[in-house]
Image: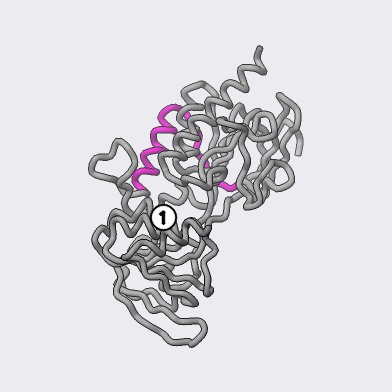
């Protein structure tokens, strides 16, 4: 490929969602002429969320897909070029001011002085057909996001780690009863979190128990559980099922080039969006395994764009 055919950019944003679109808004307003490639799931995880009630500025709430469309429109209003496509390979420069090479859909190479990574993380699900069919109809991977809709109702949560224990106690504060399904005969959560679960009267922990089927046609109406030791099946009536078995950050193509933690989340420097390479920044769930909220993702997208703008300024000095 000759150099003349390669598009050269000030700012390339990989991934959409609240982090990517907020970064795009700030970058566009700073005359960085950003180009965004949306990834496989334009709009990110919020496109699978039916109602968003906790994002500031929406007093009546808003559905996730509509919110993402509006964020895209706002980014485009300031000049962001939003393109459907997925980054499939990267070759980052280690030199300040160097060109970062990104391949899109295995066939198009673009070069950028700054790259903002907003590829997010993918929630892990059980993979049951009934679970996938009812995602958005009572099956959720975020209790903090969606628990409010099940206030005063009976729900269940699947998981055994700290996140599952934390979300179970969160749900117990607003729901009538919480049934916690633990696949083994013990929890992986820290002792402190286990004690919190044990001391919450409206949480029932079912050990050696897995989901056999989520019951309901349009929305969740119940859960068929199976004891993986006795094979006995039991049905319970619930209106919400929360899956808390972890997330996988979408960072495979960056392995070997960017610093990551043991779980694959990108490591950023201090209170910035800077990665270990000059001109490469990360924001949103791809570097945040603690909060994973739309509002925190948006805030980190703003930080990434400001960091990228300041980096470009140092190149011009």
Considering the image in quadrants, where does the C terminus appear? top right
- Which residue is more in the foreground, 201 or 219? 201
Quarter of the image with the N terminus in it: top right
Callout 1 crowding tier (Cα within 10 Å): few <14, some 14–19, many ≥20 = some
| Rendering coords of residue 60 (x, y %) | 23, 43
Relative depth, front residue between 185 and 149: 185
Which element is circle 1 on? loop
Q: Is residue 53 left or right of residue 243?
A: left
Q: Colour scheme used in the picture? A: one colour
| Front residue of this view, candidates 118 and 173 | 173
User: What span is in magenta?
Assistant: 65-86
- The image shows residue 313 at horizontal and vertical percentages of 61, 17
Q: Position of residue 205 (x, y in %)?
A: 41, 70
Question: At 35% from the left edge and 62% from the top edge, which residue is drawn?
Answer: 200
Image mark count: 1
Q: Is residue 212 left or right of residue 176?
A: right
Q: Quadrant of residue 206?
A: bottom left
- Residue 25, image quadrant: top left
In the displayed structure, would residue 295 be above or below residue 45?
above
Tell me if residue 120 comes above or below residue 76 in the rendering. below
Whether residue 38 is visible: no
* Residue marked by disc 1: 142
Residue 66's x, y, as percent?
34, 46
């Amino acid at each position: 490929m000759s150099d003349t055919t390669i598009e050269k950019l000030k700012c390339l944003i990989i991934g959409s969602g609240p982090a990517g679109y907020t970064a795009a808004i700030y970058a566009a307003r700073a005359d960085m002429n950003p180009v965004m490639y949306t990834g496989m799931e334009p709009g990110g995880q919020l496109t699978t969320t039916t109602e968003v009630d906790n994002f500031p500025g929406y007093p009546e709430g808003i559905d996730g897909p509509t919110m993402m469309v509006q964020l895209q429109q706002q980014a485009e209003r300031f000049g962001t070029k939003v393109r459907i496509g997925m980054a499939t390979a990267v070759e980052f420069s280690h030199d300040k001011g160097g060109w970062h090479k990104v391949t899109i859909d295995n066939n198009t190479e673009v070069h950028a002085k700054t790259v903002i990574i907003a590829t997010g993380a993918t929630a892990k699900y059980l993979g049951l057909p009934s679970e996938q069919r009812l995602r958005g109809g009572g099956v959720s991977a975020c209790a903090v996001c969606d628990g409010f809709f099940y206030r005063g109702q009976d729900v269940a949560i699947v998981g055994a780690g700290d996140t599952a224990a934390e979300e179970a106690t969160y749900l117990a504060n607003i729901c009538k009863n919480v049934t916690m399904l633990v696949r083994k005969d013990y929890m992986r959560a820290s002792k402190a979190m286990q004690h919190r679960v044990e001391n919450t009267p409206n949480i029932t922990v079912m050990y050696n128990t897995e989901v056999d089927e989520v019951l309901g046609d349009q929305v969740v109406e119940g859960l068929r559980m199976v004891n993986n030791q006795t094979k006995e099946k039991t049905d319970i009536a619930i209106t919400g099922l929360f899956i808390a078995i972890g997330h996988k950050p979408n960072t495979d193509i960056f392995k070997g080039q960017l610093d990551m933690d043991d779980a694959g989340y990108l490591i950023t420097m201090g209170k910035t969006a800077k990665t270990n390479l000059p001109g490469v920044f990360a924001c949103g769930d791809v570097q945040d395994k603690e909060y994973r909220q739309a509002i925190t993702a948006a805030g980190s997208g703003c930080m990434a764009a400001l960091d990228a703008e300041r980096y470009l300024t140092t190149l011009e000095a």
